[in-house]
Amino acid sequence: MNDLTPLPIVADILSVSKATLKRWENSGKLLPSCEQDGQVFYSLSDLRDFQPIKDMLESNWQEESRITAARPFTSIELFAGAGGLALGLEKSGFQHVMVNEIDHDACKTLRYNRPEWNVIESSIHEVDFKKYQDVDLISGGFPCQAFSYAGKKLGFEDVRGTLFFEFARSIKEARPKLFLGENVRGLLSHDGGHTIQTICSILESLGYFIIPPQVLKSIFYRVPQKRERLFIIGIRHDLVKYGHFTWPSPYCRIMNLQDALKGGELYPCDVPDSLGQTYPSSKQRILEHVPPGGYWRDLPDKLQREYMKNSYFLGGGKTGMARRLSWHEPSLTLTCSPAQKQTERCHPEETRPLTVREYARIQTFPDDWGFLGSLSSQYKQIGNAVPVNLALAVGQRLVAFLNLVERHFNHESRVSQIAMAEQD
């Protein structure tokens, strides 16, 4: 790996601000940085005392990425959207026996790319999961409505009417070997942590051992984006004795926007041309003054006031406003619209929003994965997706666990066959 890493990326790895890094350096907590071409760099080898960096330097990524499924493991994908999670899991070795999604455009996208998938376009309330009993995996990013506690511990029946209930119902009816729930980071702290405790308690009551929920940062898994997702994994109680699940190791370096949009390690060629939203001329005139990696505070004061209007006086960072991305950093988390004033995602050189294909690459979709529906619908589908490479990394660890289970079952079967042959 290239040991010299730009200051902004080191800040992302350690989940601290750039100012904090400089403060640590001034206090002697960090070895001094160096400058090249106006950029500040740190040597990761000098920072191996920090656990995230040590994990990168001593990663098992290469060994983990070579693991293949002992057989095509079956899976059900719920709340599938445009297929980011489903595609990543497929790449890791899962064969989807059913994919459920209610959004019509997203279903068109799924069928266009994978006509062989059994895409069920309906509300999850209408799906009978009993016909899929003993599937290997159920996965999905269930939308999480707030629960009403009323001073009591909630059980399975108490969350009826929520989409989480339907996710739990799929597990209760199909009895998969594993399940994978995916959600936003904020679920961990929602209602002081009570919501995630309730979710885990209910899933455990269905007969599953719950791996402590984990927030994974996409930048560690060959995703050029600062997206964080919460994962909840459950192992059916009768299978826990067969193995130990471990989260994926980080990749040896952090991908940036240049990796996403230019040919190189992540993609063999530059991003293909595609449709994209545009800025009104008034907004474009102002954003032309924002430098790469900058935002509204980097504008001249007169333009700050013009662009922010009354918000100029409210204080706070509002760092998503008038934001231009940088070639040398991962993208900010993509939203459902790259041109929205609160969450702009402006191209690093051209004064325009990111195009559909640029959006897709930042989410690590392959270039041949098409998106159907209106332009705004395509952005929404991509912005809501789980990055494909993140899903692949998690899927490989699920496959590794299922391989252990498969090995034990095969061993027990051989022992039984030998015993029967000896009796004969």
Image (spheres, rainbow, N blue to C red):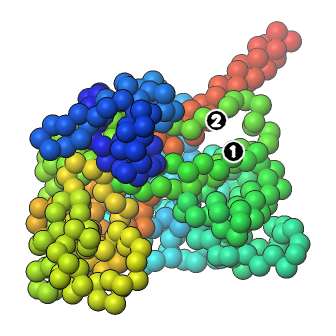
Please name whichever residue, 28 or 365, is drawn nearer the observer in this view of the structure.
Answer: 28
Q: Position of residue 135 (x, y in %)?
A: 64, 50
CA distance for labels 1 and 2? 8 Å
Q: Quadrant of the N terminus?
A: top left
Q: Are marks 1 and 2 in contact (CB under 8 Å)?
A: yes
- Above or below, 191 against 54 in this view is below
Q: Which mark is residue 245?
A: 2
Q: Residues within 10 Å of mark 2 (few under 14, many from 20)?
A: some
Q: Residues within 10 Å of mark 1 (few under 14, many from 20)?
A: some
- Above or below, 12 against 360 in this view is above
Would you say residue 157 is visible in this rendering? yes
SS type, badge 1 = strand
Determine the residue positioned at 82% across, 17% down.
Answer: 420
In screen coordinates, is 168 left or right of 34? right
Would you say residue 135 is visible in this rendering? no
Type of amino acid at the residue the image marks with label 1? Ile
Q: Which mark is residue 201?
A: none
Residue at the extreme front: 27
Type of amino acid at the residue the image marks with label 2? Phe
Please name whichever residue, 49 or 21, is drawn nearer the observer in this view of the structure.
Answer: 21
Q: Which residue is mark 1?
A: 211
Please name whichever residue, 12 or 333, is drawn nearer the observer in this view of the structure.
Answer: 12
Determine the residue positioned at 49% across, 64% down.
Answer: 80
Please name whichever residue, 176 or 14, is drawn nearer the observer in this view of the structure.
Answer: 14
